[in-house]
């Protein structure tokens, strides 16, 4: 019994007492959460839709040059695709530039008018189409969602807000 108590004490002392807390921003019924662990940023985005949800990172409020991450759930299968925005209305998957996808899809769900996507990406830019998403860096965060799963379908809501990672 003493051995069990000693083991439990050691295990408790070795556990990291700090819980990872996600930062959060909500606007126009869309919520984005994130936290950075070492070289990875974990992101969760959700909106009241059965269509796609998206976020984008840019140094300014302009759409040109935005690193855009679009997610959707189709027939229970989630996907997240990186895009680069040349100019408003002109964006395409980064893979079309010959760059490998940097996202790691963690989960996605669609339930009664809510789409939620969880994914991770490296904080270091892998190409000129990505952004250096370093801790304490400031960004204009694009937030958008659509009623449709087709990434070319226009958003029903699009806004932006300044954040610090």
Image (cartoon, rainbow, N blue to C red):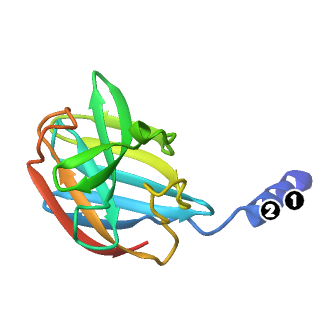
Q: Is residue 140 above or below residue 56?
A: below
Label 2 Cα neighbours within 10 Å, binned few <14 / some 14-19 / many ≥20: few
Q: Position of residue 143 (x, y in %)?
A: 23, 58
Say which residue appears at 16% left-offset and 63% top-offset.
159
Q: CA distance from mark 1 to mark 2?
A: 5 Å
Q: Which residue is mark 1?
A: 6
Say which residue appears at 35% left-offset and 43% top-offset.
117
Label 1 Cα neighbours within 10 Å, binned few <14 / some 14-19 / many ≥20: few
**Left or right of 19 in this view: 148:** left
**Left or right of 23 in this view: 9:** right
Which image quarter holds the C terminus?
bottom left
Nearest to the observer: residue 73 or residue 112: 73
Splitting the image into 4 quarters, where does residue 31 fall?
bottom left
Q: Position of residue 50 (x, y in %)?
A: 17, 36
Q: Is residue 134 above or below residue 88?
A: below
Q: Which residue is mark 2?
A: 9
């Amino acid at each position: 019994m003493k051995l069990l108590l000693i083991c439990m004490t050691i295990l408790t002392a070795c556990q990291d007492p700090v819980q990872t807390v996600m930062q959060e921003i909500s606007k126009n019924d869309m919520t984005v959460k994130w936290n950075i662990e070492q070289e990875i940023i974990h992101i969760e985005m959700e909106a009241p839709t059965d269509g796609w949800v998206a976020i984008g990172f840019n140094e300014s409020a302009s759409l040109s040059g935005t690193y855009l991450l679009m997610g959707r759930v189709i027939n229970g299968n989630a996907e997240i695709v990186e895009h680069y925005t040349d100019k408003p209305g002109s964006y395409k998957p980064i893979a079309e530039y010959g760059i490998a996808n940097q996202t790691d899809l963690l989960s996605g769900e669609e339930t009664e008018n809510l789409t939620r996507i969880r994914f991770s990406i490296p904080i270091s830019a892998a190409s000129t189409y990505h952004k250096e998403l370093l801790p304490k860096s400031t960004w204009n965060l694009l937030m958008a969602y659509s009623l449709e799963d087709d990434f070319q379908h226009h958003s029903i809501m699009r806004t932006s807000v300044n954040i610090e990672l």
